[in-house]
Image: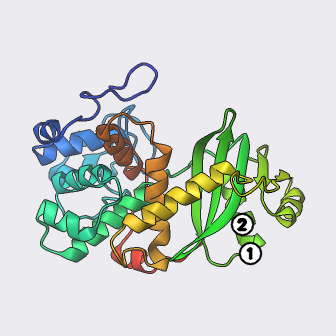
Amino acid sequence: MHAQDGTPRAGEDYPVSWRQFLDRFGTEEACVAYLQGLRWPQGFVCPHCAARTAPYPCSRGRLVCRTCGFQATVTAGTVFDKTRTPLRVWLAACWYLVNQKHGASALGLQRALGLGSYQTAWTMLHRLRKAMAPPAPAPLQGVVEIGDFCLDAGRIALAVEVARPPGVGQVRLRRLAAPSMTAMASFILGNVAPGAALRSAHAEDCQALARLGYACEHAAPQGARQPAMPGMHRVAALVRRWEQHLPQGAVQPTLLDAHLREFSFRFNLRGADSVGLLFHRLLQQAMHTAPATYRDIVQCRPE
């Protein structure tokens, strides 16, 4: 049970150490019970008819709705849908991933969990990276710096909430298929609230965004030692440093968004005081993220 303000509690809603993890998730039944609490925190809701009547258990972990007879499972329609990997292994993979400050590798995960296949480890990592983006993220508000920058694997759109005194709030990142205003406009419309005050280093961008109904200020350069948009400058530098820590060849252009989701997840939750809380948040999002097959992952395209 969460605290009255909805904040999950260390040691109760999530483990705070590997020892606590092992004690809590020693069986498949314990893992299923934990995921049920994350998927249906107010009690079971039938995915078919939305009835809130308590289901009755059936074989193979199925839950049968007493209203319509629909047979559901806690993992159906989530990142863990149709997996053959035990949930104990999935939860251990989540714990491993959030513990890697500079990003995890499939080889590292394979070795840590003793997985028999590199492809299995690789697919698990990318499924979890998909879950690192909230299914319905709140749009950025207030003053938002926007722009793009380059990585070795491609060009990146970036939006950064800024505050006074100078500080950085939430960020949004996406690989751009092409450095065009059309692509940037799509990114901004999908990630920034209509009432936000935008700042851009490019005057022509401000004119285009004004036609979309955004108030946009041209941020003129302040000199070599003082960037025009300090929030964006800081985050772009951190993303470049993040890329340098990843294994050589890990960030292919078509998979760049997956790594950007991981960076954003860690950055936007940087105030978390426990790895266990990151674990909890990742699993919360995984239970509300649509499944992805190996083919879905390898065929992904930039937006």
> Which x, y percent locates residue 23?
11, 37
Placement of 123 over or under 56, stated as above or below: below
Dot 2 alpha-carbon crowd within 10 angstroms: few under 14, some 14 to 19, many 20 or more: many
Figure check: 22 above or below 42: below
Which residue is situated farthest in the top direction here?
Answer: 4
- Measuring 15% from the left and 60% from the top, which residue is drawn there? 112
Q: Position of residue 198 (x, y in %)?
A: 78, 50
Q: Are marks 1 and 2 in contact (CB under 8 Å)?
A: yes
Task: Say whether residue 238 is left or right of residue 177.
Answer: left
* Residue at 86% over, 66% down: 204
Instruction: Residue type at mark 2: give it.
Output: Met
- Regarding mark 1 in the picture, which secondary structure is present there? loop
Q: Identify residue type, mark 1.
A: Ser
Figure quadrant of residue 284:
top left
Few, some or many residues within 10 Å of mark 1 (<14, 14–19, 20+): few
Residue 180: which disc? 1
Q: Is residue 133 visible?
A: no
Q: Quadrant of residue 242?
A: bottom left
The circle on residue 184 is 2
Q: Quadrant of the N terminus?
A: top left
- Closer to the camera, 230 or 177? 230
- Place of residue 280 in the rendered image (x, y in percent of width and height, measured from the top left): 33, 41
Q: CA distance from mark 1 to mark 2?
A: 6 Å
Question: Looking at the picture, does residue 262 appear above or below residue 95?
Answer: below
Q: Nearer the viewer, residue 69 or 98?
A: 98
Residue 182, horizontal then vertical, whole percent: 76, 71
- Name the residue at 43% across, 50% down: 288
Q: Quadrant of the C terminus?
A: bottom right
Do we see residue 127 in this rendering? yes
- In this rendering, would 108 be left or right of 201? left
Q: Is residue 180 left or right of residue 158?
A: right
Task: Determine whether the residue tagged by mark 2 lies in a helix, strand or loop.
Answer: helix
